[in-house]
Every structure is written in C-alpha cells, then in structure tokens.
Amino acid sequence: MLLMKSQNMLVRLWLREKGSTYVCLVLILLLSGCVSLEKIPPLENTHFLFITPSEEETFETLAKRYLGDVKYAARIKEFNGLDRVIASQEVIIPLQSFRPGGLTANGYQLVPVLAYHHFSRSNSNRKMIVGETRLEQQLRYLQDNGYYGITIDQFFDFLEFGQVPEKSVLITIDDGWESTYSIAYPLLKKYNYPAVLYIPTNHIREQKGRFLSWDQIRSMLVDETIDIQPHTKTHRNLTERRQGESFSSYINAIRSELGEAKHIISNKLAHETTSLSYPYGAANSFVIAFAELEGYTTGFTVKREGNPFFQNNFDLNRAMIFGGYREREFVKNIDIFESLKLEESEPIDESLNLAQLDFRNSEKYENQGQWRTAHMAWKIYRDWLVSELNKKLMNNINVSTKEYEQIKQVEKRIMGLRDKTKKIASEHYYAAIVEKEQNARFKGLLRTLLYDPKHKDALQKLKVLDQQFDMHKYLVKPNDSLKKISRSVYKNEYKSILIPIFNTQIQSNDDLTAGMILNLPKKPRKHVVSQSNQGRKKSCGQVNNSNKSKEKLSQEYYTAAMLEFNNGKTSKAVSSLDTSLCFNPGNLEAREMKELLDTLLN
C-alpha cells in the first residue's frame, strides 16, 4: 500500500511538472521494476522537434501541422538554412522564437512599413497615386528578393519582442479609395502579400463610387488578404484645433473621430480594431493618450524609417510610396537591419541557420565563454536525445536507464546556463537604469534582452526611452483644485477637463486628496506648420463676411468642398478647395484632398 501511494504521488508530481521531474520518475520506476517498458509514455520535446519529412511536405505543411499556422513556415526554413524541404532529410522545427526581435550582438532587425494611398491604371508621377504597372513591379521585386509580407498581427507580435521572418515587410493602404479594390487587391492576391487598409469611415458608402463600398471591404476582409483598421471618422488632423473651436469641443471631436470610427467598423463588419493610422501622420501626446483611452494599441505616423521591436507602439514609422518612385527610390524604403555592436559576436549571432550548431558537442561553446550559444546548443541536444529515445519507445526497442540519466544531466546544464544568462542580463539591466547617458542606457537595455528575452522591464523601458509620450504623474497637494492642477501642468485652467477623463475617480474638487497620483497626458510639443503668402491679404473670391479670418474662410470652403464631393459635384469641390487654399495655403486637409482629386481628374 505504501509503495502504491508513493507511485501515485510521483505520477501527480509528473503531471504538474514535466521535464527533468519526469525523467527522474521514469528512472525510479525502471530501477524499482514497478512498471514495464511498454507502459512508459514518450518524453516531451520542449523546444525543438526533429522530423523526417516525406516527399509531399513543404515548409508550409510542416508549419501548419506542428506549429498550427503556415505563417511560421519561414521560421522553420530560416532555422534549417534550406530553400526547400528535402524528403528524408531531417528537419528541426523550433517550437518557439529562437531570435526574438531579430536582436543579435551585431544589431537588430527593422520591419519596414510601406504606406500607399491611391492607384491608377496608368503610371503617374503624382505623389499620392501609384500606377498599376509600378505597383506590380514593386511587389515582384519584393517577391524575387525574398521579402515576406507579414500580417498586422505578426507585426504586433514583433513589437512585443516576437519573431518574424528576417526579411519582413508590412504593406498598408490609406483613405479607402475604390482603386484599392479594383487595382491593388488583385495584385496583392497574385503575389500573396497581405495588406492593412486604413479607412476614414465617413468616406465609405453602401454603393461603390470613388471610394470603396462596405460590400467591397467585406469581400476583401473575408478573403484575409486585407485587414481593416480605422483612419479616423472624417480624416481630420487630430493635432490641430480649428479656428474658433474651444478646447472642450476639440477634445470631444478627437474622441468622436477615434471612438466612432472603431464603432462603425465593428457594426458594419463585425470586426474589432486596435490599430490607428493618424491622418497626415500627425500625432502628439494628447492624441496618443486619447487613442489609448479609446482602445487602440498602436498608431502609425509617416516617418520614413523602419521599425525595431522596441519602437513606441503609438509612434510607428511608415514610408510613403509615391507615384514617381522607380526601383531605386523604392528600395531605399526597405532597410531590414540596423547594425550596432553590442558585444563580441557568438555563433548564435552569425546566422539564422542554427541547425548547423555542433549541438552534440555543446560543451565546447561553454568552454569558450559563449554562454548564449551554449544555452541554445544544449536545448537542441536535449530534444534530439528525447527524439531518439522516443523512436525506440515507439518501435518497442529497449532503452536503458543510462539514456534517461543522460537527458537528466543535459537538463541540469540547461538550467545552469539559464541561471547564468539571467544573471548576466540582470547585471546589464541594473547598470543601464542608473546610466545617465541615453545611448549607453539604450545599449545596456538591449544587452539585457540579448541574455534574457523575457525581461519585460527592459523591453518596456526601451519603448519609452525618450519619454515624450509618457503620461505625466502629478502628485496632488493640499488645497489643490482641478483648475490649480491644470495651471501647474498646462499653464492654463481650461484644460482641467482632462483630469476627470483620465482619472475617472475624480469628478470634482471634492474628490481630490493630498498625496494621490493623477495620470495626465503631457503637454504636446509645439508643431509649427509653415504657411507661405501670409503677409499680404489676397482676393480669393466673394465672401459673405469679410471680417472673418483667412483660416476660418479656408475651413468653410474646405467643408463645402467635402459636401460637394460627397454629392458627386467633383468640379465644384475642386474650385472650393482652390479657394480654401488661396485663403490659407497651410490648410493640410484641403491640400491633401486637392492632390487626390487632381489625380482623379487627370
């Protein structure tokens, strides 16, 4: 009875903690003669599978079968350094990311995000429109040169220090023009490149016209070539208050632009959204704070740079692809690696083909002080031993206690190296957080993640390194009021309406208690838009009230142009836009709409 109780206790222990505990259990049972060999279940591969593929297998079928999704095909391909699956040649399948964030001792991966807007049948040199032939040439270039089109979800995973193919690119399309469906969509399908469509929901109609219809969007979404995300409701510049607009009205407008766009897409498409493309690529600390409040997790600008894994989620980069781009200009926008020497390179840093590591002699990497490589090699070796042992069990071939003991010893080496690399990571982290020089701190945090990819604090600190989009922490003082706090933080009283929005427990002065911490968006950095021809009044057409400011008149003509365009009066809309820009050449909304309409009429 006592023996039976002991066996039951060991089995429960195994069910709770596999790995070396299970190896110990098997050893005990074998040595005690309590169980026959045939009843021992196979050991579990923890990091790698070793597969001998058949002739029909591809990287895609292997990824689907063993990793659950074809999107991991590139991971298998890169790890094994193969162009194709070769029948009967062993393939190692990594069960987790083996190079998160594309981070090595020599630098880090960049994911370029390409931003398109409008397309035409013939080539154009206009900035906002890309011809059909040129788009196909660009997609063919990406395909011929081994670039993987990733989905928005894969990109989000990368931003959380996940792994995507070494040569990844994300394609986005803004504004919701009908040419997305008639020109871009068929080509994206042809070359098997997914894309994200960012739509201003007010542009979309039930019937197709110059903009997409909801039915066209539904068909692309079901096909899974295109994902749909908001580009706000009306494509308003979120960073600018309009002439005569109160701060309270401005804040309500931002929330409407962000919240209603999500709500409309959810209602029309039964599709939940979390990503935002800022109109004109313009964002500031207020806009970002409200985007987070409305449930967004990422926001895209149009800064022409690639994205490392630590890029701030609300300050993501995109390169606008213009109509006049030839191959040379296009290629400049797809950098995939930023070189940065962090420390001496190890074999694990030199190639994605880690199947070539001499894992059967893992100890040699330890002897050379190559701790990260040794850790990886021992993990591969452990799972190779497990795979060899499981083959014997499946074929009813006797296994010895020595084989289990060998696996147990390898697991001890793995745990020892895990502890060592974590200790090294901690040393880098604590050195980094006390470092005053920002570049040195940056490198220290990267070294931390190099040795411990699960170090969440290091990743978080990297993402907010410049702190411009952090929330301001305000310590409430005795006798503080909402207006006093607003004056202290924003230098005026009327922004006190922000306090209850971001601190829902505070609705009046009575709710303030000395010592409490309030979260408030930082005061936005000043952004100056240069405006030409501002010195002299011009005659820009008949106006009803000549006492109105140029900015007010410009906005009125822009609003009229939007109504005219929506009613099919394109020529009148162009005329109104010309007048709008005459009054205020710096009206970015009117200027972009004018450029887009010009491409339609030429």
Image: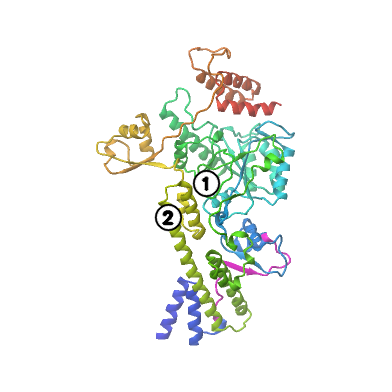
Q: Is residue 42 left or right of residue 120?
A: left
Picture layout, residue 544 above or below residue 268: above
Q: Which residue is mark 2?
A: 431
- Say which amino acid is labelled 1: Gln
Q: Is residue 136 left or right of residue 406?
A: right
Q: Nearer the viewer, residue 439 or 333?
A: 439
Picture layout, residue 381 above or below residue 332: below
Q: Secondary structure at mark 1?
A: loop
Within-10-Å neighbours for mark 2: few <14, some 14–19, many 20+: some
Q: Are marks 1 and 2 in contact (CB under 8 Å)?
A: no
Residue at 55 percent across and 37 percent down: it is 231
Counting from the top left corner in percent of width and height, residue 147 is at 67, 50
Residue at 53 percent across and 57 percent down: it is 343
Q: Which residues are magenta?
A: 39-59
Quadrant containing the C terminus is: top right
Examine the image and state in which quarter residue 563 appears. top right
Residue at 47 percent across and 33 percent down: it is 254
Picture layout, residue 582 above or below residue 90: above
Q: Is residue 71 magenta?
A: no
- Say which amino acid is labelled 2: Ala
Q: Which residue is mark 1?
A: 311
Comes first in the chain, label 1 or label 2: 1
Q: Residue furthest bottom?
A: 33
Residue at 58 percent across and 13 percent down: it is 541
Picture layout, residue 410 above or below residue 210: below
